[in-house]
Image (cartoon, helix red, strand yellow):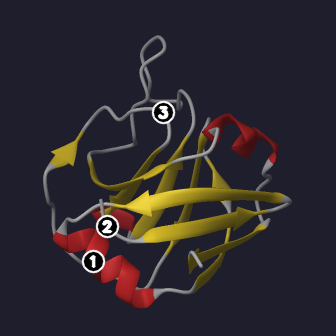
Amino acid sequence: MGQSIRITAGKISLKAELNDTATATKISELLPLKARANTWGDEIYFSIPLETSAENQKAIVEMGDIGYWPPGSALCLFFGPTPASQGEEIRPASPVNVVGKILDDPKVLKSVKDGDAVDVTKAE
C-alpha cells in the first residue's frame, strides 16, 4: 500500500492508507485537506480540489473503502449501505476510483453529522 493517513471527522479519528493508484498519489500530494462532511446513507463525502478521470472504477465498494468520485470531485468514506444500495451492498451514487482503505472500524463514522469538520492528514 501507499501513504498512511489520518482522517478526523467530528470527534472521530481513524487510521487509513491510500493505495498506489495515480488518483491516490494525486490526493496524497494535496494533503492536508480540510472540509465539511456531507452524509448520504452510510457514506461521508466532501469536495476536494482535484479533477481527474476514472481509474479502475467500482460500482459496488467494500466496508471501509475510500473512494474518489470524479463527477463531484469528492472524497468518499464508505461504512455501510447508501440510498442507492440494494440489500447490504455498499453502492456509491455512481462508480468511484477506490483510492484507499480505513484501517480502524469505519462504523464509528455513523456519529459524524452533516457539516462536521473533516481533516485528512499524512500520518506521523
At which x and y percent is residue 31? 49, 86
The residue at which mark 1 appears reads as 25
Pair 1/2: label in front = 2
Q: Nearer the viewer, residue 111 or 94?
A: 111
At which x and y percent is residue 78? 51, 42
Q: Secondary structure at mark 2?
A: loop
At which x and y percent is residue 114? 76, 57
Quadrant in which the C terminus appears = bottom right
Q: Amino acid at mark 1?
A: Thr
Using the rendered view, name the quadrant where residue 36 is placed: bottom right
Say left or right for 104 vs 116: left
Q: Earlier in the sequence, mark 1 or mark 3?
A: 1
Pair 2/3: label in front = 2
Q: Nearer the viewer, residue 64 or 4?
A: 4
Residue, far right: 11
At which x and y percent is residue 59? 26, 36
Q: Secondary structure at mark 1?
A: helix
- Identify the residue at horizontal 82%, vertical 62% (top origin): 10
Question: Rounded to the nearest whole Å, what is the CA distance between mark 2 and mark 3?
Answer: 19 Å
Q: Earlier in the sequence, mark 1 or mark 2?
A: 2
Q: Amino acid at mark 3?
A: Met
Instruction: Identify the disc placed on residue 63.
Output: 3
The residue at which mark 2 appears reads as 2
